[in-house]
Amino acid sequence: MARYRFLIEYDGTPFSGWQRQDDQPSVQGALEHALRKLGEEDPVVQGAGRTDAGVHALGQVAHADLQKPWTPFRLMEAMNAHLRQDGQPVAILNCETDNEDFHARFSAIQRHYVYRIISRRAPLTVERGRAWNVKTPLDTDAMGHAAKLLLGEHDFTTFRSTECQAKSPVKTLDNLQVTSQLRHGVTVIEISTTARSYLHNQVRSFAGCLKAVGEGKWDSEALQRALHARDRKACAPVAPAHGLYLVSVGY
């Protein structure tokens, strides 16, 4: 038996999330089904991030212990073939063997997410389901200034889902920045964040609050009050899942 490490990209739209569920489609379930079609018995694929329903990934990392001997390239090609045949919007970008001490989730020291907002009156077509369509102009300078208040170690209870199973609401945020770019006359905003780990819905909660700042409904002081309240009710409406991407995982 050998341990294989995968770099994975997926469109989260049709999935209930990363984690396997008996009655709902999941990314983990799609990957394990592909491995079963390759003759692996009861394969378990462990992911670095348990992305929610509708959340996308450009650089999810996972591992699996497999019984059959595979060359990494052949395994990658075979899995992609079965995923394609099953109509799953999931692709293995890279595959390699790793030692048994490596764990996709517990060995990770950094996770990088991006939340995408497209600011325009017209509904999205090509990017539908790939970004949050905000119809009002946003002040990205104000959003970026407010974002700095969340850096460092804090009790992030306000930005934590009531269903979060983390033992502690205290996390350390290494990076949170807001950038914007004008593309074909349309403003594309990206909220980028890096940390070792996150609470459930933390990044989407940040995005919802920063959007409120960008609209002028909140200011930096309001965001700081929300942080210090340590109360989920103090959070602005949470941003939709389809604007969020797991971009990379560091080890």
Image: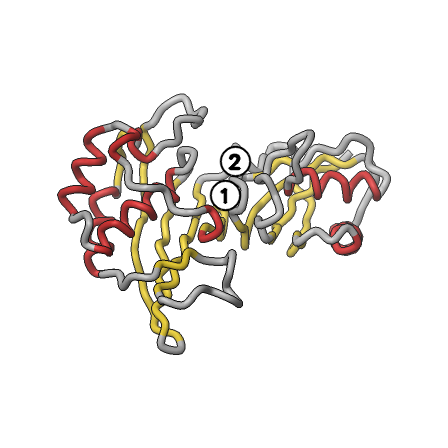
Q: Which of 89 and 4 is in front in this view?
A: 89
Vertical relation: 225 (above or below) 95: above
Describe residue 234's horizontal placement relative to residue 120 as left or right.
Answer: left
Mark 1 burial class by Cα count in 10 Å: few <14, some 14-19, many 20+: few
What residue is disc 2 on?
A: 107
Left or right of 42? Residue 52 is left
Task: Give whichever of 172, 20 is nearer the camera.
Answer: 20
**Dot placed on the residue nearer the N-terminal end, 2 or 1:** 2
Q: How far, Cα to Cα, is label 2 from label 1? A: 6 Å
Is 169 in front, or is 236? 236
Question: Which amino acid lies under the numbered mark 1 shown in the image of this protein?
Answer: Tyr
* Residue extending farthest bottom: 184
Determine whether the residue tagged by mark 1 lies in a helix, strand or loop. Answer: loop
Tags 2 and 1 touching, CB below 8 Å: yes
Q: Position of residue 31 (x, y in %)?
A: 71, 43
Q: Which residue in the protein does label 1 denote? A: 251
The residue at 16%/36% (across/down) is: 225
Residue drawn at point x = 36 percent, y = 67 percent: 120
Query: Identity of the amino acid at label 2?
Result: Ser
Q: In this view, does 220 lie above or below 144?
A: above
| Residue 140 position in % (x across, y down) | 25, 60
Q: In which quarter of the image is residue 58?
A: bottom right
Q: Which residue is drawn at 43% across and 49% down?
A: 113
Residue 110 percent location from the top left of the image: 43, 43
